[in-house]
Image (cartoon, rainbow, N blue to C red):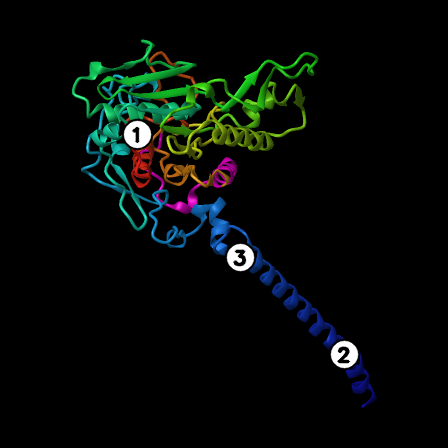
Amino acid sequence: MDQLTTQTRHKLPFTPVIIKRGLCYALSFFVILISSIIVFNLGDFPDPLAFVGNFFPWKLAPNQRRPPSGACDYSYGRWVRDENYPIQMYDENCPFLDPGFRCRQNGRKDVEFLKWRWQPDGCDLLRFNASDLLERSRNGRIVFAGDSIGRNQWESLICMLAQAVSNKSTIFEDKGSPITKHKGFLSMKFQEYNLTIEYYRAPFLVTINRPPIDSPAQVKVTVRVDELHWYSARWTGANVLVFNTGHWWNKEKTVKMGCYFQEGGKVNMTMDVMEGFRRSLQTLKSWTTKNLNPERSRVFFRSYSPVHYTNGKWDDGGVCDAEIEPEKNYKKLKAEAWNNQYITDVTKKMTYGNWKVQFLNITYLTAFRKDGHPSRHREPGTLPNAPQDCSHWCLPGIPDTWNELLYAHLLSMEFRTK
């Protein structure tokens, strides 16, 4: 009896401890849950899925990506194989294509990558109408500014529109410059419509300068995050502007190459790439609101275009030439580039009053298309051991779909030059 009593006496004190510990866990979980609900209701997230999907949208099942009520979100959907696709908008004989984008002429044998059509969730993507867009843009200017992926999209749009012009000799570069990997800017004139479609090469969108005197020896060049590229003086007055940047915003193309960030007359040696990118977008926002007329200019910021290197990066053996069809499993897509979150934030802040800057989100649909790159089928004269190109796109190809989205958004905005 004494032994049993002693054992019972020793066990009794532990029971309340276990209960209290469980109670603490339950209360902690309850507090976190309530806090989360408050945060989601006070913040910009209509539901918890939006928080996850805002940065990693393809980690959600397709039925969890919900567009705003009544809206068609062309950004999310699936690629559908269609033997009748494309309704041939143009081919590689379009005279306005860079040689590096003419993949089949450069040796690519398969045409399967052209047999896929983008099908948005819950709606249909309007068929691109070149004659309609030309007429809507009459006496106007469409400007693309950014890195060479923006040039991909620019050339695509020119060829898509050119199909509606019977006399191709009425389409020409304003100053007679050849369509090559030009490092400055190009302006294609559609004479019958008095329309120019312009491309400005500005990989960072902001100014690149020599470093100030007395800068540290490792500083070879600086990115002026507080000063928009001097080309911006030419962007004023455009009817449609499509900005893009991102592929140069990494350590490999900045700090490791002696490129640092500058504000005013001083180099900031501790500013990282993400902060430099954020500040440059603020500079773009400030310029846009001060220099553009919202009644005249429709402004788009195109999202990051994914790359598809496997077994290495672009400069250390990465390849993509074995890919002949899109990725079919959204769970295998890489996490969304951090750049997009910054772009989304700044476009939201630029949507007020008469300003409605559009985030042209092509990242998700493009992430599937590992089969659409030039890979080893680069421009004539490229050395056999040169790196594969798994960042740019064959034309015709994926950027055509980007321009279909651009056209659909312009229609929803009732765009027409005045």
Give the residue pinned by disc 2. 11
Given this view, does label 1 or label 2 mark the residue nearer the observer? Answer: 1
Residue at 34%, 49% in the rendered image:
71
**Which one is earlier in the sequence, the residue at label 1 or at label 3?**
3
Q: Work out whether 378 lies above or below 413.
A: above
**Which one is earlier in the sequence, the residue at label 1 or at label 2?**
2
Which region is colored magenta?
Answer: 322-348
SS class, disc 2: helix
* Crowd band around label 3 with a 10 angstrom C-alpha radius: few (<14), some (14–19), many (20+): few
Residue at 56%, 33% in the rendered image:
278
Q: What x and y, as percent, mark residue 329? A: 38, 46
Q: Work out whether 244 lies above or below 98.
A: below
Give the residue pinned by disc 3. 41
Using the image, tell me which numbered label, if any, was put on residue 417.
Answer: 1
Amino acid bearing label 2: Lys
Residue at 19%, 33% in the rendered image:
87
How far is disc 1 from disc 3 in space, using C-alphas? Answer: 40 Å
Left or right: 268 in relation to 188? right
SS class, disc 1: loop
**Which one is earlier in the sequence, the residue at label 2 or at label 3?**
2
Amino acid bearing label 1: Thr
SS class, disc 3: helix
Amino acid bearing label 3: Asn
